[in-house]
């Protein structure tokens, strides 16, 4: 059974296996197909048109399915590997062990934001950035460099978890409700702000070029599970007949064989190290 763990609790061996599986996925070319898919959805999801991966109710089930597919790819290389999550309310500085050279490596150098240490540094030769929106073929970060930008606090997360309604019309980046506040287009801004705090590729449509993408989204996914536990009488909305939006029982691109309803119960696929 797959148990997703807080990244701060991983053993040295678990970190090494996770990093090695990422590098093998990259070497084989499979990793970059995930970057391409994410970028295609970022480019096509629009507030008043068809929207599936982002700025819509299916943001959460779409990313749950995307992460599952990625985790299964890692497990095809090393069956002991699972996706860790990054609780950015707790591990909230560039000095966190997450950013050490034995795990994801640190922030970029000031001149060009190039990451200089760890397995994903350009100099390691393991991590060429091929799916890109500019000419730079090296991983970049500028952790917390956006003047005064800080990661969300636990109190901010709790204020969003307290929202009882999953999502509201017009089902986009202007919606009220839990989904859009977690995604971050409205209110205290959780998920979007973390992408910006990391900087570099993480602040672009090709954000899965940085392996922290998976740890960030695994925590966003856990927050959905935590919200479900807090609001057992609330569920995914909308339930049917909504133009341009994935209703509860509609299939989601690019898979076309999975619905939000199929994704509601994460325990069918994995559990977390703490009770959700
Ligand atoms: Cu994201």
Image (cartoon, helix red, strand yellow):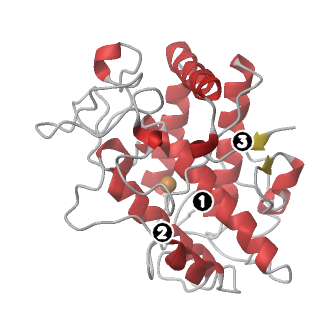
Q: Position of residue 93 (x, y in %)?
A: 37, 54
Q: Could you classify mark 1 by the number of other residues whose Cα lies within 10 Å: few (under 14), some (14-19), or many (20 or more)?
A: many
User: Residue at the location (50% across, 60% down)?
Assistant: 45
Q: Are marks 1 and 2 in contact (CB under 8 Å)?
A: yes
Q: Is residue 156 left or right of residue 69?
A: left
- For mark 2, give the secondary structure: loop
Q: CA distance from mark 3 to mark 1?
A: 14 Å
Sequence order check: which comes first, mark 1 or mark 2? Answer: 2
User: Residue at the location (59% across, 78% down)?
Assistant: 158
Work out whether residue 24 can be spotted.
yes
Q: Position of residue 60 (x, y in %)?
A: 65, 61
Q: Mark 1 and ligand 1: say if the CB distance to the nearest ligand atom is below 8 Å.
A: yes
Q: Quadrant of residue 115?
A: top left
Q: Could you classify mark 2 by the number of other residues whose Cα lies within 10 Å: few (under 14), some (14-19), or many (20 or more)?
A: many
Q: CA distance from mark 2 to mark 3?
A: 22 Å
- For mark 3, give the secondary structure: helix
Mark whose residue sits in front, 3 or 1: 1
Look at mark 2 in the image and give the residue it sits on. Answer: 190
Mark whose residue sits in front, 2 or 3: 2
Question: Which quadrant is home to the C terminus?
Answer: bottom right
- For mark 1, give the secondary structure: helix
User: Residue at the location (73% across, 25% down)?
Assistant: 75
Q: Is residue 124 left or right of residue 170?
A: left
Of 71 and 8, nearer the camera is: 8
Look at mark 3 in the image and give the residue it sits on. Answer: 68
Question: Which quadrant is home to the N terminus?
Answer: top right
Sequence order check: which comes first, mark 3 or mark 1? Answer: 3
Look at mark 1 in the image and give the residue it sits on. Answer: 220
């Amino acid at each position: 059974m797959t148990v997703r763990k807080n990244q701060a609790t991983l053993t040295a061996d678990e970190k090494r296996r996770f990093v090695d599986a990422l590098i093998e996925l990259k070497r084989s070319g499979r990793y970059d197909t995930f970057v391409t898919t994410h970028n295609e959805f970022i480019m096509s999801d629009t507030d008043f048109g068809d929207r599936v991966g982002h700025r819509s109710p299916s943001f959460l089930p779409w990313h749950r399915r995307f992460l599952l597919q990625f985790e299964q790819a890692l497990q095809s290389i090393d069956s002991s590997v699972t996706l860790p999550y990054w609780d950015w309310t707790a591990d909230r500085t560039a000095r966190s062990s997450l950013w050490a050279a034995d795990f994801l490596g640190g922030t970029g150098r000031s001149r060009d934001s190039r990451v200089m240490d760890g397995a994903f540094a350009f100099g390691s030769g393991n991590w060429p950035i091929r799916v890109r929106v500019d000419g730079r073929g090296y991983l970049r970060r500028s952790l917390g460099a956006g003047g005064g930008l800080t990661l969300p606090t636990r109190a901010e997360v709790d204020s969003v978890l307290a929202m009882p309604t999953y999502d509201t019309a017009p089902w986009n980046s202007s919606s009220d409700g839990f989904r859009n506040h977690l995604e971050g287009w409205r209110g205290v801004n959780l998920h979007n702000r973390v992408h910006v705090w990391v900087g570099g590729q993480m602040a672009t449509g090709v954000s899965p070029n940085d392996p922290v993408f998976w740890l960030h989204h695994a925590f966003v996914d856990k927050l959905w599970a935590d919200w479900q536990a807090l609001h057992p009488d609330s569920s995914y909305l909308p339930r049917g007949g909504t133009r341009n939006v994935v209703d509860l029982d509609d299939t989601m691109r690019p898979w076309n064989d999975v619905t939000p309803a199929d994704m509601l119960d994460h325990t069918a696929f994995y559990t977390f190290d703490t009770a959700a």
